[in-house]
Amino acid sequence: MSINKTHVNRLKDGRGQGRGEQYVPFIQANDNKVASKGWLTRTLGWHSNRIHHTLSKYEYQYLIVQDWSDQVVDIREQYPLTPIEATQKIAAKLNIKHPQYKGEDVVMSTDFMLTTKNIHGELQEHPRTIKPIHKLSKRTIELFEIERQYYKEMNLNWKVVYEVGRPISFIQNIDWLYDARRLDGRPGLDIEMVSMLAEPLLNKLQILNRTMSISKKCLHCDNQLGIEPGTSMFMVKHMLANKHWTTSIMEPIRESAPLQIERSVNQSKVEAL
């Protein structure tokens, strides 16, 4: 069976290869793939320091949750199952039609390949496929079986992640602070400025009336500290994203509501940033 030339060329171009900042997703947001309800995102990752390409809302949400985890050290999305001969062999053995496009076999891909580090410093790989339950079909299950057998032969524990049971408030909170992890998105704010502002800002936030919304508290702090409007709110997100400050991250965060913030344990100084 002939192999789709576009997919062959992607592999030749280095797609699906590398790690960390050097990894290149096999499928990218500009490849004219039909996205799920228009969801095509290019997201600058926390761990990888590169742009991630996600093709659905569920993939994006899974990405940011994994970026929040301290155990995850690398995230490779749209990870190809290569060589294609491996999945072709499995499909033939199972008597399942291999994925095709216009009569040509195509390279299968897994939504995410996570790399974690255990307490002994050992790296472990975790292939994960994201799938809404309402999109399950007989054909989907067949393709899952090819994927499962492929990773079984590699001695990797592949799993399907469904959308049910997701911690929605937690996901929305991470999404709210996600872009504030780095300072390059906030002109005029650098590490020296953060070091200078963090302590007095936290003190003022904790002194102000506990029933006051976080947005009003931040406006008060902007005014009292003589800084550009919006800086205090960005600082709150930045310090939470970097886990120098903590809050009830599993509870809904609304800018129009109070938000209690504390200094993280063992994070008494901002110089650790």
Image (cartoon, rainbow, N blue to C red):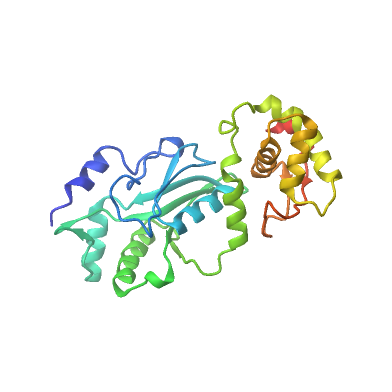
| Left or right of residue 15, residue 243 in this image | right
Toward which corner of the image does residue 242 lie, by quadrant? top right
Residue 129 in view, yes or no: yes
User: Can you give x and y, in whole percent of width and height, for residue 57 in the image?
Assistant: 45, 57
The structure residue drawn at horizontal position 68% and vertical position 38%, both measured from the top left corner, is 235
Residue visible at 56% across and 33% down? 185
Depth check: give the residue in front, 69 or 179: 179
State left or right for residue 209 relative to residue 138: right
Total marks shown come to: 0
Q: Where does the image place residue 102, in percent across and percent down from the top left?
A: 15, 58
Q: Quadrant of the C terminus?
A: top right
Residue 113's spot in the image, x, y percent? 43, 51
Tell me: residue 118, above or below residue 140: above
Residue 69 can be seen, yes or no: no
Q: Left or right? Give the position of 72 relative to 259.
A: left
Quarter-of-image position of residue 9: top left
Of the 4 image quadrants, the one containing the N terminus is bottom left
* Residue placed most toward the observer, 60 or 105: 60
